[in-house]
Image (tube, rainbow, N blue to C red):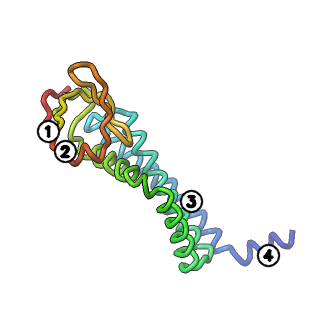
Amino acid sequence: MELLSNFFKENHRQLIVTIIVIMAIYFLKLIINKIILKYGNHTHIKELRTRVIIKYSSILINILGLILLITIWGVTPEWIFATFASFFAIVGVAFFAQWSLLSNVTAGFIIYFTVPFRIGDTIKIIDKDNPIEATVEDIKAFYVVLRTNDGFPVTFPNNLILQKAISTIKSS
């Protein structure tokens, strides 16, 4: 019992700041979620897409909050830097061949917030070698699902969608 009492006496500031940070993270996530939901409703974006963006933003806020809590409890910046450098070196080597995963997720965020097309729109991807005219069936975090006029499904990576010129032929 005395050990616990000493812990509270020695670390009361960190405990108070930790509680404040946890509450701030909670309220920040609530505010950002409301903003994203309002934006999704205003631009008539499907709720499933909005939920994916909310999930990604919550993960980002949690990571930033964890970094803040680690610094509050006295972990030195050098240790944090060394840990993150080691982690990202391992992740970089592991995903070297899969670099497009991150670019597809980033492109998914851009497609969500810029809304160049919607589910149900008929679009034409202007490509000199392989032009595609199709209806957008779904927009996922990594790719867009299209259906050609012949009825064939086409899965198009988000990063390539942003690199190609697109013409909206018919809006839903």
Residue 6 at x, y = what percent? Answer: 79, 75
Check disc 2 and report the residue beneath it: 164
Please tell me which of labels 4 and 3 falls first in the chain. Answer: 4
Q: Which residue is mark 1?
A: 126
Judged left or right of residue 73, residue 27 is left
At label 4, the amino acid type is: Asn
List x then y, in percent, for residue 55: 46, 45
Question: In what element is the residue under mark 1?
Answer: strand
In the rendered view, tell whether residue 161 sits above or below residue 151: below
Q: Find residue 74 and name its label.
A: none
The Cα atoms of the two marked residues, 4 and 2, are separated by 63 Å
Q: Nearer the viewer, residue 97 or 43?
A: 97
Assign the N terminus to one quadrant of the image: bottom right
Mark 3 or mark 1: whose residue is earlier in sequence: 3
Amino acid at circle 3 = Ile
Question: 123 or 153, which lies in front?
Answer: 153
**Residue position for label 3:** 22
How far across and how far down the image is residue 70, in percent?
59, 70
Between 101 and 116, the residue placed more toward the observer is 101
Q: Position of residue 164 (x, y in %)?
A: 19, 45
Q: What whole-number distance in Å separates the C-alpha atoms at marks 1 and 4?
A: 69 Å
- Can you name the residue that lies furthest to the right here? 1
Q: Which residue is mark 4?
A: 6
Horizontal side, residue 14 vs residue 155: left or right = right
Q: Quadrant of residue 72?
A: bottom right
Q: Mark 2 or mark 3, which is nearer to you?
A: 2
Q: Nearer the viewer, mark 3 or mark 1?
A: 1
Query: How busy is the neighbourhood of tag 3: few (under 14 within 10 Å), some, or many (20 plus)?
Result: some
Separation of residues labelled 2 and 3 (CA atoms): 43 Å
Q: In percent of the image, x 83 and y 72: which residue is there? A: 3
Q: Are marks 2 and 3 in contact (CB under 8 Å)?
A: no
Residue drawn at 43 percent across, 54 percent down: 97
